[in-house]
Image: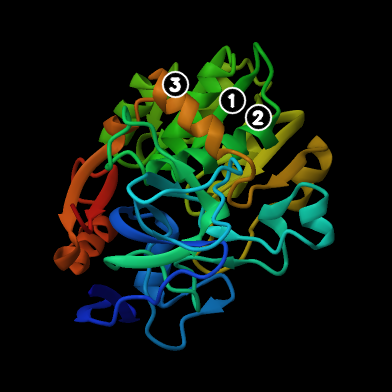
């Protein structure tokens, strides 16, 4: 089978490798159909690391994915505890928790210290034609959702979790820094959750325009303004109830803190390239901010599927570029360069 393997920073090579063995108990084999390219993938592609995880040998990226079941192991029950069958299309939750530790038993599998994660070194991801996955991590896709939309259910799940942590209430004011796919989905969900005033900021004009179309009453290019000043001016100096950082967690974290009102809430979704969090202590302390670090998602796939089916969130509108598996290197280079009009890159692995 064909595989796209990362050998080092900006070094992706296509190779032929053996297909996986038959699935074991609780596993299924998928024919991978589509894979999304995530901002966290770009960290690994550009530097060979993310946070304190360093890729010390070649591995396969790709954690946003869907596929078709082609083989079923014993006791292969999906995320709804239903038996999986050959021919079903499924979207996959990439984090596989142990289900036995204190955090898992308390309902926080996204914080499981014993988990592994498809597409994060050393666990190979989905940029390959066949793959064995945990059946419990599979969620059946309805016929109304296309293959291209499937990987975006993971992206939507991340946004749902951030909204859950934000505790947005009807009439809340919200600022979202970063209008990439996750930021755009957070913007849309904030509006759906009842926020009366949503601000969105990015440095790419087409993303600013998309944020405006998806529910931001006020959307601005950060290169044309001081985001914190804009929020202060438009809220009469109060600031917003909730500030959500969904960019690259550099100076944007401080900007988000500056936007939040006294007693407000700051949710950090982005991942800093240098693994450092920069935040002026006096601002956060004097405002008495509640700071939430959003890690991946938990218990979100059923809701993501329902939202996509309802058309309240039109995931296909995020897909701007599609590439074949053989073009993986080109796809990553295009995303890293943020070519004009680029929102979400989808890689077509199989048909």
- Name the residue nearer the viewer: 112 or 273: 112
- Residue 178 visible in the displayed image: no
- The correct choice, above or below, for 218 with respect to 78 in the image is above
What residue sits 83% from the left and 37% below the top?
288
- Name the residue nearer the viewer: 136 or 237: 136
Residue for badge 2: 242
Rendering quarter of residue 18: bottom left
Q: Give residue 144's position: percent from left, percent from top.
A: 31, 27
Q: Residues within 10 Å of mark 2 (few under 14, many from 20)?
A: many
Label disc, if present, on residue 29 of the rendered structure: none
Q: Residues within 10 Å of mark 1 (few under 14, many from 20)?
A: many
- Residue 240 visible in the displayed image: yes
- The correct choice, above or below, for 305 with respect to 106 in the image is above
What residue sits 83% from the left and 49% below the top?
106
**Mark earlier in primary sequence (2, 1):** 1
Gap between marks 1 and 3 measured at Cα: 9 Å
Disc 2 to disc 1: CB gap under 8 Å: yes
Label disc, if present, on residue 174 of the rendered structure: 1
Residue for badge 3: 216
């Amino acid at each position: 089978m064909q595989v796209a393997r990362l050998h080092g920073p900006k070094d992706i090579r296509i190779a032929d490798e053996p297909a996986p063995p038959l699935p074991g108990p609780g596993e299924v084999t998928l024919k991978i159909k589509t894979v999304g390219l995530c901002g966290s993938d770009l960290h690994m592609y550009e530097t060979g690391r993310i946070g304190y995880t360093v890729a010390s040998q070649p591995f396969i990226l790709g954690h946003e994915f869907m596929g078709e079941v082609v083989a079923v192991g014993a006791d292969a029950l999906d995320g709804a505890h239903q038996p999986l069958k050959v021919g079903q299309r499924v979207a996959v939750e990439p984090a596989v928790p142990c289900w036995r530790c204190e955090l898992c038993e308390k309902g926080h599998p996204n914080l499981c210290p014993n988990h592994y994660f498809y597409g994060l070194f050393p666990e190979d991801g989905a940029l390959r034609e066949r793959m064995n996955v945990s059946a419990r991590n599979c969620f059946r896709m309805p016929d109304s959702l296309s293959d291209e939309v499937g990987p975006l259910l993971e992206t939507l799940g991340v946004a749902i979790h951030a909204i859950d942590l934000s505790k947005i209430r009807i009439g809340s004011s919200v600022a979202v820094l970063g209008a990439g796919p996750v930021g755009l989905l957070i913007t849309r969900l904030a509006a759906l959750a009842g926020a009366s005033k949503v601000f969105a900021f990015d440095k790419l004009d087409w993303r600013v325009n998309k944020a405006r179309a998806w529910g931001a009453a006020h959307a601005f290019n950060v290169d044309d303004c001081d985001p914190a000043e804009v929020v202060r001016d438009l809220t009469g100096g109060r600031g917003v109830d909730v500030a959500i950082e969904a960019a690259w967690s550099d100076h944007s974290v401080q900007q988000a803190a500056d936007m939040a009102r006294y007693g407000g809430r700051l949710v950090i979704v982005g991942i800093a390239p240098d693994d450092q969090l920069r935040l002026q202590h006096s601002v956060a302390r004097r405002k008495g901010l509640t700071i939430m670090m959003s890690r991946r998602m938990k218990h979100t796939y059923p809701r993501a599927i329902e939202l996509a089916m309802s058309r309240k969130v039109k995931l296909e509108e995020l897909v701007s570029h599609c590439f074949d598996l053989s073009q993986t290197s080109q796809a990553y280079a295009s995303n890293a360069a943020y070519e004009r009009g680029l929102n979400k890159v989808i890689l077509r692995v199989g048909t």
